[in-house]
Amino acid sequence: MPPLIFILNGPNLNLLGEREPAVYGRETLADLEAACRDEGRACGVAVEFRQTNHEGKLVDWIQEARHAARGLVLNAGAYTHTSIAVLDALSVLTMPVIEVHLSNIFRREAFRHHSYVSMAATGVIAGLGSDGYRVALRALARRLAA
């Protein structure tokens, strides 16, 4: 059985393709999920793809990943910049965590420049659009194979 990687997405990512397409692109969340599943198969990993608009649900899923997954890709959306609860949940993980952002958060509003997630992440990918998720999956697959 291939190693399982959780891909968790936070608030408003369900609006991909509709919300600020100049910033986030025209792909939908369903398009992104399909691309991640394809990349996972190509890399020899299984993918569990989820999205929520609720901070507590995101924390629950991060905690679930402790025992269910071997790696985590996380786009926490706005919770990246605000949630100590997400940071605390991530701090317990012993697996590699890749933080992903569709947009380059450092070319945006100043409040987006700080990330609580980064404090617990193995690596950060920002500004590559949906390609960032595929890069994250490849990086995790290589780490897990080593």
Image (cartoon, grey):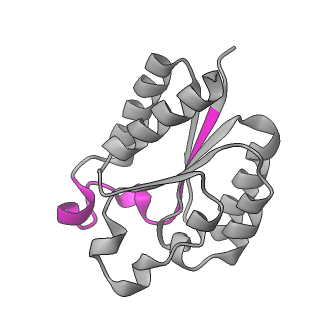
Q: Position of residue 139 (x, y in %)?
A: 50, 35
Q: Position of residue 72 (x, y in %)?
A: 62, 44
Question: Farthest top residue?
Answer: 1
| Residue at left offset 52%, top offset 77% | 81
In the rendered image, the vertical position of residue 115 relative to residue 65, given as above or below:
below
In the rendered image, the vertical position of residue 67 relative to residue 119, given as above or below:
above
- Is residue 49 shown left or right of residue 1? left
Q: Quadrant for residue 31, please give it.
A: top left
Q: Quadrant for residue 140, please give it.
A: top right
Quadrant where the N terminus sits is top right
Q: How many tags in the picture?
A: 0
Q: Position of residue 55 (x, y in %)?
A: 64, 69
Question: Farthest front residue?
Answer: 146
Q: Quadrant for residue 12, please give it.
A: bottom left
In the rendered image, the vertical position of residue 132 relative to residue 92, given as above or below:
above
Front-lying residue, 120 or 24: 120
Residue span colored magenta: 5-25
Front-lying residue, 56 or 89: 89
Question: Farthest left residue?
Answer: 22
| Residue at left offset 54%, top offset 27% | 142
Front-lying residue, 90 or 26: 90
| Residue at left offset 48%, top offset 21% | 43
Look at the image and say whether residue 121 sits in the magenta stretch: no
Q: Position of residue 57 (x, y in %)?
A: 69, 61
Front-lying residue, 79 or 52: 79
| Residue at left offset 47%, top offset 66% | 77
Quadrant where the C terminus sits is top right
